[in-house]
Image: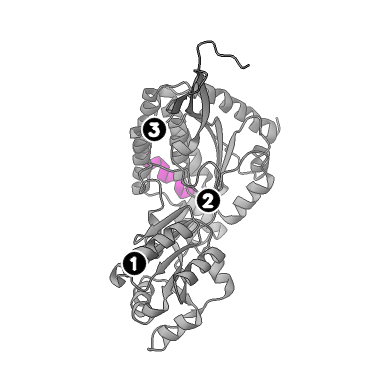
């Protein structure tokens, strides 16, 4: 049997499992999620062993430091995966929720009910934790899931998926509700994208190249988790100590994530007092600063460290590394215009004590999440109370921002009558 036929058989089994999973009670789904969490923690040693195989292969292939960091499992990260599954189990089950029940003039009652989407295909790179996060969210929302991780994480993903599947079945889930595509053949991606009769939604998570490939080839609706070119704008009225702490956190707390700050915009009126202090702290943390001419003048003029001149490309680059572009702007209008031109509609922040400016930024900046006096690193399902997330959607239809349980359901109309007919 060829690759495409094998994948199709797997998708058919997951489709059948999804029909059974949609009827599972919250109790069964929650019991399965808790069993999965326990299994992952119990198998920490074996998971680390499998992950080490991927890390050694990645080093041999010359994977960059940020990619290796995203690929790495640690006991803490395995504990976090388990905690994410438990958080999802504790969340209200969205399936079956009825909204907007109204009575029409002819007496029928019309409402909407949340139902699973069906089968969701997740195509992702690097991070093995996505295997557990995606499976947990899909199970709780009643969806079958087909997972196709990157070849760089194949050993880790196979081990995680095997434990999830075994624990889920033992707890009462239908077999094949969670399916991992175990081949590293890239053709598998293109084949999956043609199964529009078996897969209802594709969610790609990874770099710009992967997203573009999926969008160009998919015959199935795609929910995009696009790149994160995230900005922090320090307004003229900002509390500068607060701005320092937020900017440092947004860049260095975990720079290889999509919600890390990639560009810092600073109002001209406070640039001379703010930039030298934040630049010193950033450089002490290992950050390379690429600045506009005024940034260079302010930071090098006083004998400071050498600043790399920013090119036009820098304003559109998602570094995912300890590199930051910095620009001095004349006003909030200039900052918002820069964001509109160069941003990716992911996460944007303003640091300000001016209420009117805060509200303008909230209302006028187009992004999946907009922050006032807070770090862009908070654009995350855990931080926003959703539990584990499927990703951060930068699409405009159906779901935008962190995709939790409700984003993995759709609505169907339900109608109650007592004999009404259409005349």
Instruction: Classify residue 78 as left or right of residue 335.
Output: left
Give residue 36's mark.
3
Tell me which segment is drawn in magenta: 43-53
Circle 2 packing at 10 Å, graded few (<14), some (14-19), many (20+), is many
Q: Which mark is residue 394?
A: 2
- Residue furthest to the top: 419
* Label 1 crowd (10 A; few <14 / some 14-19 / many >=20): few
In the rendered image, the vertical position of residue 389 relative to residue 279, given as above or below: above
Where is residue 185 drawn, in percent x and y?
A: 64, 43
Please give the name of the residue rendered at 28% of the width and 71% of the height, measured from the top-left corner.
241
Colour treatment of the image: one colour
Which residue, given by chain and number where applicable, does mark 1 sit on? 354
Residue 44 location in percent, x, y? 37, 41
In which quadrant of the rendered view does residue 237 lie? bottom left
* Observer-nearest of 396 and 70: 396
SS type, badge 1? loop
What is the magenta segment's predominant secondary structure? helix
Query: Between residues 401 and 75, which one lies in front from this camera angle?
Result: 401
* CA neighbours of label 3 inside 10 A, class few (<14), some (14 to 19), many (20+): many
Q: Position of residue 343 (x, y in %)?
A: 53, 62
Ranked by sequence position, the earlier of labels 3 and 2 is: 3
Asked whether, in this view, residue 141 is left or right of residue 420, the answer is left
Residue at point 57% right, 76% down? 311
């Amino acid at each position: 049997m060829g690759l495409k036929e094998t994948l199709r058989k797997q998708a058919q089994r997951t489709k059948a499992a999804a029909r059974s999973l949609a009827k599972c009670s919250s109790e069964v789904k929650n019991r399965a999620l808790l069993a999965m969490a326990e299994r992952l923690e119990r198998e920490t040693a074996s998971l680390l062993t499998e992950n080490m195989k991927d890390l050694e292969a990645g080093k041999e292939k010359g994977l960059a430091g940020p990619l290796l960091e995203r690929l790495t499992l640690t006991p803490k990260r395995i504990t976090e995966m388990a905690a994410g599954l438990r958080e999802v189990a504790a969340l209200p089950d969205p399936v079956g929720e009825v909204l907007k029940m109204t009575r029409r003039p002819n007496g029928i009652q019309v409402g909407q009910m949340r139902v699973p989407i069906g089968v969701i295909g997740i195509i992702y790179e690097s991070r093995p934790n996505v295997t557990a996060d995606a499976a947990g969210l899909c199970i709780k929302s009643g969806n079958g899931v087909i997972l196709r991780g990157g070849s760089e994480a194949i050993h880790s993903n196979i081990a995680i998926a095997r434990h999830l599947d075994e624990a889920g079945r033992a707890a009462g889930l239908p077999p094949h509700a969670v399916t991992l595509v175990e081949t590293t053949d890239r053709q598998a991606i293109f084949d999956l994208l043609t199964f529009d009769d078996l897969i209802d939604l594709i969610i790609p998570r990874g770099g710009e190249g992967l997203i573009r490939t999926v969008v160009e080839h998919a015959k199935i609706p795609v929910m995009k988790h696009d790149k994160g070119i995230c900005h922090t704008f320090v307004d003229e009225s900002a509390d500068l100590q607060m701005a320092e702490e937020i900017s440092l956190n947004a860049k260095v707390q975990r720079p290889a994530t999509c919600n890390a700050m990639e560009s810092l915009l600073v109002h001209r009126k406070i640039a001379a007092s703010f930039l030298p202090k934040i630049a010193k702290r950033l450089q002490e943390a290992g950050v390379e600063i690429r600045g506009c001419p005024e940034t260079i003048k302010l930071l090098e003029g006083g004998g400071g460290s050498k600043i790399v001149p920013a090119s036009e490309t820098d304003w559109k680059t998602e570094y995912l590394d300890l590199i930051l572009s910095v620009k001095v702007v004349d006003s909030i209008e200039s900052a918002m215009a820069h964001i509109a031109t160069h941003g990716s509609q992911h996460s944007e922040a303003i640091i300000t004590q001016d209420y009117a400016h805060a509200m303008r930024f909230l209302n006028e900046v187009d992004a999946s999440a907009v922050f006032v006096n807070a770090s862009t690193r908070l654009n995350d399902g855990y931080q926003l109370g959703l539990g584990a997330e499927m990703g951060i959607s930068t699409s405009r239809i159906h779901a935008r921002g962190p995709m939790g349980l409700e984003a993995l359901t759709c609505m169907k109309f339900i109608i109650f009558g007592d004999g009404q007919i259409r005349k």
